[in-house]
Image: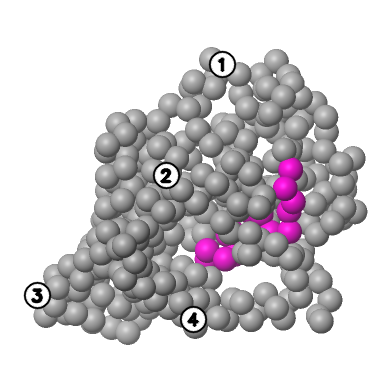
Amino acid sequence: MVGVEELPFRQGMVPPRSALPDVLPTERLTERATVRPPLRDELRRVRNVRSALAFASLAAQVTGVIAGVVWLAHPLAYVVGFVVMGRVIVCLNVLGHEAVHRTLFSNRALNDWAGRWLASYPVFVAFELYRRGHMAHHRDELGPDEPDLALYRGYPISRASLRRKLVRDAAGITGWKLLRALLRGLRKPRTRPVAARIVGLHLGFVAVATAFGRPELYLLWIGPYLTQWRVTNRLRAIAEHGGMIRSADRRETTHSVRQGVLARTFMVPYHLGLHLAHHVDIGVPCWNLPRLHRELRASGWLPDELVYPSYRSLWGRLSSAPAA
């Protein structure tokens, strides 16, 4: 069986049309690969309890990290806490993404409140602006209004080029650039309200830490955001759309990757890695994406040959261009 890495790509990272089975529509899927009723209604059911438990779990992790660092007072505790907080930031970004799609909570007011104050603002994301840009992303993936086109296009690139990007991310250069942009938003009437809310929230975090006599604990939050999260975000983003093309067929806009334990833990929690399924139907909550993914596989629309065996194999393909 030919694997995706051996396919003769048309351009960039796009598989040949001969590798894209023309099997739609089927009894269960429409011509756009979305699921037909009544299964569609099941898949689009928002799981309020599951979302609430996710927030509760993250709150417990943050509390545990802070308590462990204070109690142990050991450099290794700070290192472990740094990594765990980086994972929490990834998770909050995913939950904020769900809220943008209004699939986090069935009550719209609660969905947007939690998306802002519990998920997005703590990780420096302007929820309102992100929703506007992200919907443009879904309306026309890799089209002229794609907000993240600069992040996806041009792949495959050389290994040295990808390494330089990741080093900038790990060194905090990318994160600081984005943080400065947020601070500059305080000077602009259009962005000032949301920027002020985000900055105010984080000043509150610092104030609380200072009140307990441990202002340095805030570094366990801002540090991973500026470094670990930037690396994770780039690796995830290019694994979703790097080198793909504008197309009505989502198999030409979005990669599909087999999900490993480490990836699900630190980079694509809550099934975000099943990204092709997400782009097929953006109304399906992340908790239900595995079932939609299985439907796409069972129909033959997403054959094994189009699924990368691991993120490492996909990143290898994304960085396979000769050095300039």
Disc 1 residue type (three-letter): Pro
Q: Is residue 13 left or right of residue 283?
A: right
Per the model, the C-alpha gap separating discs 2 and 3 is 34 Å
Q: What residue occupies the far front of the structure in this picture?
A: 189
Comparing labels 1 and 2, the label whose residue is closer to the camera? 2
Percent coordinates x, y for residue 263 in the rendering: 55, 58
Tag 2 near tag 3, CB within 8 Å = no
The answer to whether residue 238 is seen in the rendering is no
The structure residue drawn at horizontal position 59% and vertical position 41%, both measured from the top left corner, is 139
Per the model, the C-alpha gap separating discs 4 and 2 is 27 Å
Disc number for residue 37? 1
What residue would you read off at disc 3? 211
Mark closer to the chain start, 1 or 2: 1
Does the segment drawn in magenta span residue 54? no
Percent coordinates x, y for residue 141 in the rendering: 64, 47
Per the model, the C-alpha gap separating discs 1 and 4 is 48 Å
Percent coordinates x, y for residue 253 in the rendering: 70, 47
Mark closer to the chain start, 1 or 3: 1
Q: Is residue 280 left or right of residue 13?
A: left
> How would you rate the neighbour count of disc 4 (Cα within 10 Å): few for under 14, some for 14-19, many for 20 or more?
some
Mark closer to the chain start, 4 or 3: 4
Dot 3: what SS? helix
Does the segment drawn in magenta span residue 234? yes
What residue would you read off at disc 2? 100
Per the model, the C-alpha gap separating discs 4 and 3 is 30 Å
Disc number for residue 173? 4
Q: Is residue 268 left or right of residue 23?
A: left
Disc 2 residue type (three-letter): Val
Magenta stretch, main secondary structure, is helix
The residue stretch that appears in magenta: 232-247
